[in-house]
Structure formats: structure tokens, C-alpha cells
């Protein structure tokens, strides 16, 4: 075996050659037997990689190169490119840019998920800095889903060998999404705290249930005044129309002329690069997130921009009581997704149950059972009647 321990060191090293290629490094072992076993396994591993390289006609792809290629082809064009950039950077640091894709297996994925779950984030709640563990949803979005996307593209598009991984086993269970509705008094607080140039885009979200990205990417060409509808590019890049009632029309009409292409704009507070102070520019995804977090979350600590969508759905459902209408507005493919808003009909059900109870004989008097006959009133007999009996 080609293992040895340099003078003055405790760890054995390996050094061998296969097909004219030299391999050397640390065995991470402190005794000869373990070092020889490590070197033997390393020989098998490198021999397999050389065979694969010969089959492909090139060296197998490393994770660092795969991550960079994925960013160039997919990531930089994603709607959430900033979040994706951070997620890819985290994976590169943890996996190592030099690791071959074929060596990313289920064991490594489980290790990555565990490490991410142990990390903490900080947020401001009631004016205080609070430390919390990373949520299951964040782990799924920033580790498992991103890594799966990279490896899937490597296998199906770049024809690279990757290890089989059962991704479902690594997805953490997420709590059911809450349905947070904005109360009337909270709506007053929200707009009092929010910058005036962001009022229109937030009101649009409250009226239509559009997602954040659907709001900021809305262009004037998407507004069909004559057809009384607005076209949005939703999840999965699916184009869909949303009815434009008079309230939405009244909101959008005065915004014409503020920008030639985009509907929603903001006023630059200071000059920066090509921006001039006092000029209007299109509201961006990250810009709206930042403005909402800075202005609103300090006043409504548990309210997110996505809750505007929840609010729009619950208000429409409460007004009409028809779950199919809410499904159409939110553009849900499956009505079971919309069913989480059914709680808003609780009061209607309660009133109907009460009305029904007043009509039924069984519940007119809850202290008496309708199938039990009323007892006859006992009348005392006179002395004469007793004698005659």
C-alpha cells in the first residue's frame, strides 16, 4: 500500500498512480491499517471516475462548475434571483466546489438539511431583536429544492452522472399556511406607516389578490381597459386574466403617465447611479419587500406582503360566500388550495344553524324531549268517589 506518515506528523498520507494520473492527499487516519483501507477505497473511487471520464470524453462535472452553470442558464433569470444567489453560495461553501456531482448522495443531503436547520436568523419583534431557528419552509426552499434543481438539470440537460436521491424523504414537513386577514383598524395603520408612493401597489394587491411579483411586473400593455381585465404572469409563468371592477379601474387610471412601461412606480428619495432624486422609477421585487419590511412590519409585526392576498380572498369570500369565486380570483388549479379560506364563512354557517334550530320541533324547548308525552296532572279524589270505587 502506498501510504506513509511524514516525520513529525500523526496523519498518514496516500500517494498512488492510475493510468498515468497521480493521486495524493491525506487519509485522515492515525494508524497504518485504517490508512491502507482508506487508500484502497480511494483507488476504487478514482478508477471509477476515470472510467466515467473516458465514457463521457471529459472529466465529470464538479459542484462548483455545475452551480455556476446553473446560475448562468437559470438562476440569474429567476424572479427571486437574490435569494437564489445566497442559497447557491451557501451550498457551494458547505458542499465544496471541488466535489464531483456523482458524490453528492442522500447522506450528504441529509447532513446539509440538518446543518441548515440548526442555523438561526434574527428579526425585530415589538422593537426587540429576536433570534429564531430557520424554519422548515426556509430549509426546503434554500437547500433541498435548490440542490435538487441543480442536480436535475445536470442529469437531464447536461447528461452528467448523478447519484439517485429520494428527494421527498429530505423535504421537511411545513406547518399549514396561516390565513392572516387585515382588519379595518390595521389597514389604517398600514397605510399611515407606508410611504405614499407605495400605496397604489399595496391597494392593488388588497383588491385583486395578486402576488408581490405579479404586482411589480405589471405593465400598461397588460391592462385591458375596454375588456375590463388585467393580465398577469403568475406562478409557473402562466398567463391569466383578472377582472377589473370599477374600484381597480379607479385605482389604476390616475397612474397613467407616471411611467411609459410599468404601472407601479416609486419616487427616488436620493440620487444614486442613474437615478435622480424626485424622479419616478419602476418598483422592483426587492425594493417593495424592503419598503414593506421597513415601514409596515414595525407597526404590524406579524403581517407580510403575501397576507394582502389572504385578505383579498377572505373579503371576497365573505361578501359572496362562494368558494369557486375565490378560487377563480386567486387562480388556484385545485379548489382544495382555496378551501383554507372557508373559515370566513363560519358566521354564515352559525346563523344558518341557529335559524334551522328554531324551525325544528326537537329544539324549540331544549329542556324537554319531543318524543316524551307530557305527564297527566293528578287530581285528588273525593271521599265519596273513593267509597264508590
Image (cartoon, helix red, strand yellow):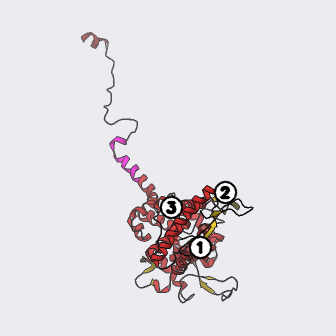
Q: Is residue 366 magenta?
A: yes
- Please, what secondary structure does the residue beneath circle 1 have? strand
Residue that carries the numbered disc 3 in the rendered image: 106
Against 220, residue 167 (above or below) is above
Disc 1 to disc 3, C-alpha distance: 29 Å
Would residue 137 be seen by someone viewing this image from the given angle? no
Q: Which residues are magenta?
A: 351-370
Quadrant in the picture for the C terminus:
top left
Which residue, given by chain and number where applicable, does mark 2 sit on?
A: 30
Secondary structure type for disc 2: loop
Q: Position of residue 14 (x, y in %)?
A: 62, 65
Between 388 and 294, the one lying in front of the other is 294
Say if 254 sits above or below 106 in the image. below
* Among numbered discs 1 and 3, the one appearing first in the sequence: 1
Q: Residue at x 33, y 25 (%)?
A: 377
Circle 3 packing at 10 Å, graded few (<14), some (14-19), many (20+), is some
Whether residue 128 is visible here, answered yes or no, is yes
The residue drawn where x is 61% and y is 64% is 2
Residues packed near mark 2 inside 10 Å, few (<14), some (14 to 19) or many (20 plus): some
Q: Which mark is residue 22?
A: 1
- Label at residue 127: none
How far separated are the C-alphas under marks 2 and 1? 23 Å
Where does the image place residue 375, in percent across and percent down from the top left?
Answer: 33, 27
Tally of numbered tags: 3
Residue 185 in picture, x, y percent from top left = 59, 64
In the orientation shown, which residue stands out farthest toward the left?
388
Left or right: residue 107 versus residue 268 is left
- Label pair 2/1, CB-CB below 8 angstroms: no
Q: Main secondary structure of the magenta part?
A: helix
Amino acid at each position: 500500500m502506498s501510504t506513509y506518515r511524514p516525520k513529525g506528523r500523526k496523519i498518514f498520507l496516500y500517494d498512488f498512480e492510475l493510468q498515468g494520473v497521480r493521486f495524493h492527499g491525506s487519509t485522515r487516519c492515525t494508524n497504518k491499517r485504517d490508512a491502507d483501507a482508506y487508500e484502497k477505497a480511494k483507488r476504487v473511487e478514482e478508477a471509477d471516475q476515470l472510467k466515467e471520464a473516458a465514457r463521457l470524453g471529459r472529466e465529470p462535472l464538479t459542484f462548483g462548475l455545475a452551480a455556476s452553470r446553473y446560475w448562468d442558464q437559470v438562476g440569474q433569470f429567476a424572479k427571486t434571483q437574490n435569494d437564489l444567489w445566497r442559497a447557491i453560495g451557501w451550498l457551494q461553501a458547505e458542499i465544496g466546489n471541488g466535489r464531483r456531482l456523482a458524490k453528492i448522495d442522500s447522506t450528504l443531503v441529509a447532513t446539509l438539511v440538518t446543518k441548515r436547520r440548526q442555523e438561526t436568523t434574527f428579526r425585530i419583534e415589538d422593537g426587540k431583536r429576536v433570534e429564531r431557528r430557520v424554519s422548515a419552509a426556509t430549509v426546503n426552499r434554500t437547500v433541498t429544492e435548490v440542490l435538487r434543481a441543480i442536480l436535475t438539470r445536470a442529469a437531464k440537460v447536461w447528461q452528467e452522472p448523478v447519484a439517485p436521491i429520494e428527494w421527498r424523504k429530505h423535504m421537511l414537513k411545513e406547518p399549514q399556511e396561516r390565513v392572516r386577514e387585515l382588519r379595518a383598524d390595521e389597514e389604517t395603520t398600514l397605510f399611515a406607516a407606508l410611504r405614499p408612493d407605495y400605496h397604489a401597489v399595496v391597494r392593488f394587491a388588497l383588491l385583486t389578490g395578486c402576488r408581490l411579483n405579479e404586482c411589480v411586473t405589471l405593465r400598461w400593455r397588460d391592462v385591458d381597459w375596454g375588456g375590463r381585465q388585467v393580465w398577469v404572469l403568475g406562478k409557473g409563468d402562466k398567463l391569466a386574466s383578472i377582472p377589473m371592477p370599477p374600484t381597480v379601474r379607479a385605482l389604476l387610471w390616475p397612474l397613467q403617465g407616471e411611467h411609459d412601461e410599468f404601472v407601479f412606480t416609486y419616487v427616488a428619495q436620493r440620487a444614486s447611479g442613474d437615478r435622480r432624486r424626485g424622479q419616478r422609477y419602476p418598483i422592483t421585487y426587492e425594493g417593495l419587500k424592503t419598503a414593506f419590511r421597513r415601514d409596515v412590519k414595525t407597526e404590524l409585526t406579524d403581517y407580510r406582503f403575501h397576507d394582502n392576498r389572504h385578505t383579498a380572498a377572505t373579503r371576497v369570500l365573505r361578501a359572496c360566500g362562494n368558494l369557486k369565486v375565490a378560487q377563480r380570483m386567486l387562480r388556484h388549479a385545485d379548489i382544495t388550495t382555496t378551501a383554507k379560506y372557508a373559515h370566513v364563512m363560519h358566521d354564515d354557517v352559525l346563523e344558518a344553524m341557529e335559524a334551522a334550530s328554531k324551525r325544528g320541533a326537537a329544539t324549540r324547548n331544549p329542556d324537554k324531549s319531543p318524543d316524551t308525552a307530557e305527564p297527566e296532572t293528578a287530581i285528588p279524589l273525593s271521599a265519596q268517589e273513593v267509597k264508590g270505587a
